């Protein structure tokens, strides 16, 4: 990306979010909306994007700390044209600039890359990413010359005439500009009639009036182009990401039976021939092995690693836990901060009581242990390999159950006889 700079606009208020948290910091599948945009910029080759911040800038700046990004403050939120102007100095070393909006998180890196290549190849003054939307309301419309010809202007919904509102081709909020042309056009932008803002989109008509070449680069996927203007946009984005992930898994070696009720984080890793049943949530950073059965109604939270051939059934929640190969937790169970051995059976209603009100502690369950229904394991505690706990027992903290022993009752006591090899007492 030699000579190509990148600026991300993230200073706006997000009025339609009615939130105390800056809009761009709202969570979308385990990471803030703005992080999605930063990740896309970085994977398209922009090493240190400039990020324009303003509304609650302290919080956004803290979020950017430690990231390869250059924050720039826009003092007053006077519009997207003014926001780019605020970054003029930080962008001065580049020949061309990609402008991204911090509230448009689903654009694929391939799309950004193609836009940049097309801009470079054409040598245009400005290349705008556009898409046809079923329902274009709220977006800037792309006004073309007669017979679908060249782009003439971008008209914001609030300022659009009735005829213009019918246009379905919209401005995604992603552009490449020749830097010199961009800043000379920005100087000429006037406040809009209705919103009284300096619209970056007005730079398009200004450049054209000066004989510069502006091109539209159209993508085919309206899903990647939605802006996060309200919480319902965020909800829509959440299910789009989930659907993308499920579709990707179903195209490969994992079965996701009901993508419409299954929510799997983009970065979750799931092994071959695993089947995911409906109403399952698999969060950030989870790893599931091969040939597993997951769900229905199951939630795997961060830090979960499920071994090959394990079965995790309905109403099971697992967090920061490693479940060994072939282990089973099939019903109504909470496993937190635990290590479950290979082939262990976690009975219905088992709870690892990992939090004592002050700190969290771990539970270790050995290979082939058999945890009876309704057992509460008060952490820190260990149940040895091949050991058994009786139904309804409460194993108190540090009262470890030795391997192959049987613990029963409340509080659990260890029976003197070990179980025999077949697992029977
Ligand atoms: C904008 C576009 C519209 C496009 C849509 C795509 C303009 C004028 N309009 O409309 O054509 O279809 O995005 O989603 O650009 N921001 C600042 N400083 C400001 C104002 C905004 O940094 O003073 C940032 C916001 O944080 C946001 C982005 O710019 O990330 C876009 O602003 P927003 O107000 O959401 O514009 P839209 O009305 O959605
Ligand atoms: Ca927006």
Image (cartoon, helix red, strand yellow):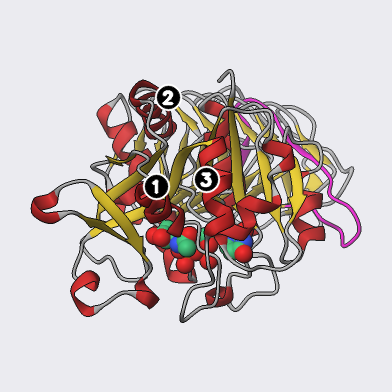
Earlier-in-chain disc, 1 versus 3: 3
Q: Is mark 1 within 8 Å of ligand 1?
A: no
Image x and y of residue 118, in percent: 34, 27
Disc 2 crowd, CA 10 A, few/some/many (<14, 14-19, 20+): many
The numbered mark at residue 100 is 3
Q: Quadrant of residue 18?
A: bottom right
Give the Cα separation between the discs numbered 1 and 2.
Answer: 57 Å
Please report the bounds of the magenta region as a residue range.
353-372
| Vertical arrangement, residue 57 with respect to residue 44, above or below | below
- For the residue pair 252 and 201, the one nearer the viewer reads as 201
Residue at horizontal 31 percent and vertical 71 percent from the top: 137
Which residue position holds label 2?
Answer: 271
Is residue 91 shown to the viewer in this render?
Answer: yes
- For the residue pair 256 and 424, the one nearer the viewer reads as 256
* Image quadrant containing the N terminus: top right
Q: Is residue 211 left or right of residue 340?
A: left
Q: SS for tag 3?
A: strand
Does the segment drawn in magenta span residue 370?
A: yes
Residue at horizontal 56 percent and vertical 59 percent from the top: 80
Q: Quadrant of residue 357?
A: bottom right
Q: Give the dominant element type of the magenta stretch: helix, strand or loop.
A: loop
Give the Cα separation between the discs numbered 2 and 3.
Answer: 35 Å
* Residue lying farthest to the left in this orientation: 147
The numbered mark at residue 103 is none
Q: Is residue 318 left or right of residue 406?
A: left
- In this rendering, the label closer to the viewer, 2 or 3: 3
Earlier-in-chain disc, 1 versus 2: 1
Image x and y of residue 193, in percent: 46, 79
Which residue position holds label 1?
Answer: 210
């Amino acid at each position: 990306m030699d000579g190509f700079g990148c600026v991300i606009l993230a200073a706006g208020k997000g009025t339609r979010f009615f939130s105390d948290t800056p809009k761009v910091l709202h969570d979308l599948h385990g990471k803030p909306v703005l992080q999605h945009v930063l990740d896309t910029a970085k994977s398209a080759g922009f090493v240190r994007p400039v990020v324009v911040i303003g509304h609650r800038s302290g919080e956004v700046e803290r979020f950017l700390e430690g990231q390869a990004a250059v924050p720039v403050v826009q003092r007053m939120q006077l519009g997207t044209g003014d926001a780019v102007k605020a970054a003029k100095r930080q962008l001065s070393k580049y020949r061309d600039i990609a402008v991204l909006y911090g509230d448009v998180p689903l654009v694929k890196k391939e799309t950004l890359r193609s836009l940049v290549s097309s801009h470079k190849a054409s040598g245009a003054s400005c290349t705008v990413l556009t898409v046809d939307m079923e329902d274009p309301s709220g977006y800037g419309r792309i006004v073309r010359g007669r017979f679908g010809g060249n782009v003439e202007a971008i008209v914001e919904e609030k300022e659009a005439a009735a005829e213009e509102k019918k246009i379905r081709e919209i401005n995604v909020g992603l552009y490449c500009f020749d830097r010199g042309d961009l800043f000379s056009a920005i100087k000429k932008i006037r406040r809009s009639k209705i919103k009284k803002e300096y619209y970056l989109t007005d730079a398009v008509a200004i450049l054209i009036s000066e004989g510069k070449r502006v091109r539209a680069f159209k993508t085919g996927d309206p899903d990647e182009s939605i802006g996060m203007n309200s919480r319902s946009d965020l909800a829509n984005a959440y299910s789009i990401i989930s659907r993308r992930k499920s579709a990707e898994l179903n195209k490969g070696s994992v079965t996701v039976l009901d993508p419409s009720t299954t929510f799997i984080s983009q970065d979750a890793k799931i092994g071959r021939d695993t089947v995911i049943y409906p109403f399952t949530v698999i969060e950030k950073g989870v790893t599931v092995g091969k040939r597993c059965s997951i769900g229905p109604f199951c939630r795997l939270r961060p830090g979960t690693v499920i071994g090959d051939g394990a079965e995790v059934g309905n109403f099971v929640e697992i967090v920061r836990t490693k479940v060994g190969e072939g282990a089973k937790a099939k019903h109504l169970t909470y496993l937190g901060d635990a290590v479950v051995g290979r082939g262990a059976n976690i009975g219905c209603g088992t709870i690892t009581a990992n939090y004592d009100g002050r700190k969290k502690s771990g539970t270790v369950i050995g290979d082939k242990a058999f945890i009876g229904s309704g057992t509460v394991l008060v952490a820190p505690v260990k149940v040895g390999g091949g050991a058994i706990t009786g139904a309804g027992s409460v194993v108190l903290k540090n009262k470890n159950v030795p391997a192959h022993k049987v613990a029963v009752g409340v509080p659990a006591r260890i029976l003197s006889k070990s179980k025999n090899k077949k697992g029977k007492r």
